Amino acid sequence: MLKSSAQKVQDALDTLGFHNITVLELPASTRSAAEAAQAVGCQVGQIAKSLVFKTKTSQRPVLVIASGVNRVDIRQVGELIGEKITKADADFVRQQTGFAIGGVPPVGHSKPLDIFIDADLLTYNQIWAAAGTPHAVFQLNPDDLLAMTGGQVAELKQI
């Protein structure tokens, strides 16, 4: 039986028609990209880390799903959204997504989010995403990520 936050993600996946994707709860932490990669046995780049930002003026949430090896260029994301952004604090993340930092999934949020996807994730056949808790993940392919989130693909890494 999944913890309630992980079950919320599984329910969202099922509702979206991704019945072939299963949320896994692991004994090891998946809070960071490096921990998640070690826990599932993949490259750090295959971890689709969900980072929540906040627009500076309108205070809107922005979700960036980035390859685990990349640092996000927040200026680039701000240009895409048309407003400067800043990293969101833990309370804002929970309020906007329904999940705590370290477990924010790409789906199942409590409010609609602007979503951007790091183009580097599309270079992998399989990727792993957080599933509601710092111990829950699910495996998917980049096409599924695009379909389930409706996110905009962009070059988002700092150079």
Image: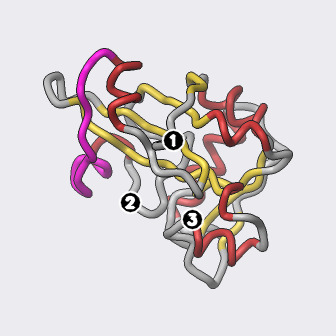
N-terminal-most mark, 3 or 1: 3
**For the residue marked with disc 2, what is the amino acid?**
Ile
Q: Residue at x 41, y 19 (%)?
A: 80
Q: Nearer the viewer, mark 2 or mark 3?
A: 3
Q: Could you say which disc has been placed on residue 23 in the image?
A: none
Coordinates of residue 74 in the picture (x, y in percent): 35, 37
Coordinates of residue 84 in the picture (x, y in percent): 23, 27
**Range covered by the magenta-colored residues:** 82-94
**Circles 1, 2 touching at the beta carbon (< 8 Å):** no
Left or right position of 51 against 75: right
**For the residue marked with disc 3, what is the amino acid?**
Ala
Q: What's the CA distance linking mark 1 and mark 2? A: 20 Å
Q: Nearer the viewer, mark 1 or mark 2?
A: 1
**For the residue marked with disc 1, what is the amino acid?**
Lys
Coordinates of residue 14 in the picture (x, y in percent): 72, 40
Q: Pick out the residue farthest to the bottom.
A: 27
Neighbour tally class for label 3: few under 14, some 14-19, many 20 plus, Cα within 10 Å: many
Instruction: Report which residue position mark 3 lands on.
Output: 33
Neighbour tally class for label 2: few under 14, some 14-19, many 20 plus, Cα within 10 Å: many
Residue 80 falls within the magenta-colored stretch: no
N-terminal-most mark, 2 or 3: 3
Q: Nearer the viewer, mark 3 or mark 1?
A: 1
Q: Residue at x 48, y 60 (%)?
A: 103
Left or right position of 119 against 52: right
Instruction: Report which residue position mark 2 lands on.
Output: 101
Instruction: Report which residue position mark 1 lands on.
Output: 157
Q: Nearer the viewer, residue 13 or 84?
A: 84
